[in-house]
């Protein structure tokens, strides 16, 4: 549960979007978990052979390109390596493993696809944690306030909340005595901040905070890291104009999402006869697992296409599973620029199939599917394997979806203007 009246003063919308964009950049994007034939044994690898049947996809006029590793001229790569070993001033500090990682990152980045990426082992592990909704840390949602690293919100029941950390606190310095680390946060990226604040369970991290409270001085807060469970689904029942509405918020499409979704559906079903409708809120939801998006859309759509996939070797329509547990209730969907990937699939399917109104701001615009491959060094390779189309046939990549009712949340007020506009839209149905 969470309250509709949130403390928002001083926290800008742009700062909130930084969090969503970061999650997308880290790989919290649509992940592909179906065991489709096109991605198991038929994907070309160096030296492999694909039968003529799959070598050419006539519908896409596509021919598979295979490369023999021995045909690639790496002479100048090894020349550069040799020069570094011989002449680099600090050649004794050269880390060959990191150099190979850097070369791999460069190779993947050369494709020019921002969603096809190599993640080093530590980043790959953290990406998996984000989708699982559990990690070891102190329970702070991070962002920026006027360019300074800041607490967006302490998560309920976490070490940060228990120690009195508040939304809007500026994080000036981080100290980790366990690894003899102490550094000011000026100039840090969010990824650097996450790396230094997260850590092993039971270890201690000290944050130097500044709170704009009548000229108060910076102060230190010592936090002991613990397992942090991040909700995927949150629900509250809001009364407006003498009528009750379900505000159903989707935060990510992760490993625990359906378990939490099912519990929320139970709560809604128990109140179904007295509800004026559902406000499905996917603002700042960066996406997640493809199949979870299909499951959730199926609770509103009785039958028909949820999304279509156009891959290298085939095209496929993914249809509703027909659960339709929430299909009889009026519905509106809240979106913004942080709504991406799987959340756009759900919002777009509801719009195209049911005529559901979208309220808020233009969505992010991510229309591709990534498959996550685990590599032998513990790193991960996220590969764009297909594009997806909404039931109406549109591809929203880089464009996003426009809304039916445009409204922005005002960070200077305690009301959620977008939520209120969504409820107003339900009242007019």
Image (tube, rainbow, N blue to C red):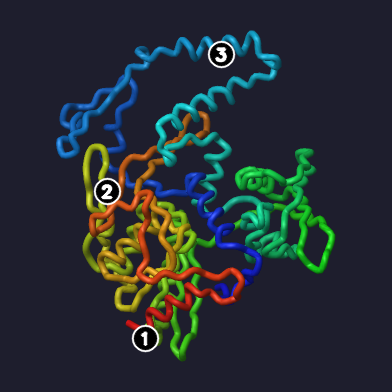
Examine the rendered structure and indicate whether residue 357 appears above or below residue 26.
below
* Place of residue 186 in the rendered image (x, y in percent of width and height, measured from the top left): 72, 46
Q: CA distance from mark 1 to mark 3?
A: 71 Å
Mark 2 Cα-neighbour bin, 10 Å: few <14, some 14–19, many ≥20: some
**Residue 209 in sight from this viewpoint:** yes
Mark 1 Cα-neighbour bin, 10 Å: few <14, some 14–19, many ≥20: few
Disc 1 element: helix
Which-is-in-front pick, marks 1 and 2?
A: 2
* Place of residue 232 in the rendered image (x, y in percent of width and height, measured from the top left): 49, 61
Q: Residue at x 44, y 49 (%)?
A: 29
Q: Quadrant of residue 14?
A: bottom right
Which badge, 1 or 2, comes first in the chain's sequence?
Answer: 1
Q: Residue at x 30, y 32 (%)?
A: 43
- Residue matched to label 3: 81
Which badge, 3 or 2, comes first in the chain's sequence?
Answer: 3
- Residue matched to label 2: 309
Residues tagged 1 and 3 counted as in contact (Cβ below 8 A): no
Q: CA distance from mark 3 to mark 2?
A: 42 Å
Extreme bottom residue here?
242
Examine the rendered structure and indicate whether residue 116 appears above or below residue 147.
above
* Place of residue 352 in the rendered image (x, y in percent of width and height, measured from the top left): 27, 64
């Amino acid at each position: 549960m969470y309250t509709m009246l949130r403390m928002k003063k001083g926290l800008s919308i742009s700062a909130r979007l930084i969090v969503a964009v970061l999650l997308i950049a880290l790989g919290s994007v649509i992940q592909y978990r179906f065991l489709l034939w096109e991605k198991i044994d038929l994907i070309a690898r160096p030296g492999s052979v694909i039968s003529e049947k799959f070598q050419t996809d006539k519908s896409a006029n596509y021919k598979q390109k295979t490369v023999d590793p021995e045909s690639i001229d790496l002479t100048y790569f090894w020349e550069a390596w040799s020069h570094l070993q011989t002449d680099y001033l600090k050649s004794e500090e050269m880390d060959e493993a990191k150099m190979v990682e850097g070369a791999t990152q460069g190779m993947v980045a050369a494709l020019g696809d921002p969603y096809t990426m190599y993640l080093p082992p530590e980043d790959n592990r953290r990406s998996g944690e984000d989708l699982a909704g559990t990690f070891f840390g102190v329970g702070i949602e991070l962002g920026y306030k006027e360019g300074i690293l800041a607490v967006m919100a302490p998560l309920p029941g976490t070490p940060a909340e228990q120690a009195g950390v508040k939304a809007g606190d500026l994080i000036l310095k981080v100290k980790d005595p366990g690894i003899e680390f102490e550094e000011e946060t000026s100039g840090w990226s969010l990824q650097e901040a996450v790396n230094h604040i997260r850590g092993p369970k039971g270890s201690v991290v000290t944050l130097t905070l500044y709170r704009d409270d009548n000229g108060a001085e910076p102060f230190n807060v010592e936090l002991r890291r613990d397992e942090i469970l991040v909700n995927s689904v949150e629900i509250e029942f809001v009364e407006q104009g003498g009528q009750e509405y379900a505000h159903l918020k989707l935060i990510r499409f992760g490993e625990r999402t359906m378990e939490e979704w099912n519990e929320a559906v139970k709560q809604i079903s128990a109140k179904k006869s007295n509800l004026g409708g559902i406000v499905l809120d996917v603002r700042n939801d960066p996406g997640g697992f493809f199949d979870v998006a299909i499951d959730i859309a199926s609770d509103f759509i009785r039958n028909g296409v949820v999304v279509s996939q156009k891959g290298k070797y085939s095209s496929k329509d993914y249809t509703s599973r027909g659960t339709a547990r929430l299909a009889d209730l009026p519905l509106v969907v809240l979106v913004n620029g942080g709504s991406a990937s799987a959340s756009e699939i759900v919002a777009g399917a509801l719009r195209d199939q049911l005529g559901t109104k979208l309220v808020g701001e233009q969505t992010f615009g991510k229309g591709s599917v990534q498959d996550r491959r685990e590599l032998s060094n513990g790193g991960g390779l996220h590969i764009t394997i297909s594009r997806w189309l909404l039931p109406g046939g549109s591809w929203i990549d880089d464009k996003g979806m426009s809304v039916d009712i445009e409204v922005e949340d005002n960070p200077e007020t305690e009301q959620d203007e977008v939520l209120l506009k969504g409820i107003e839209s339900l009242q007019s149905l």
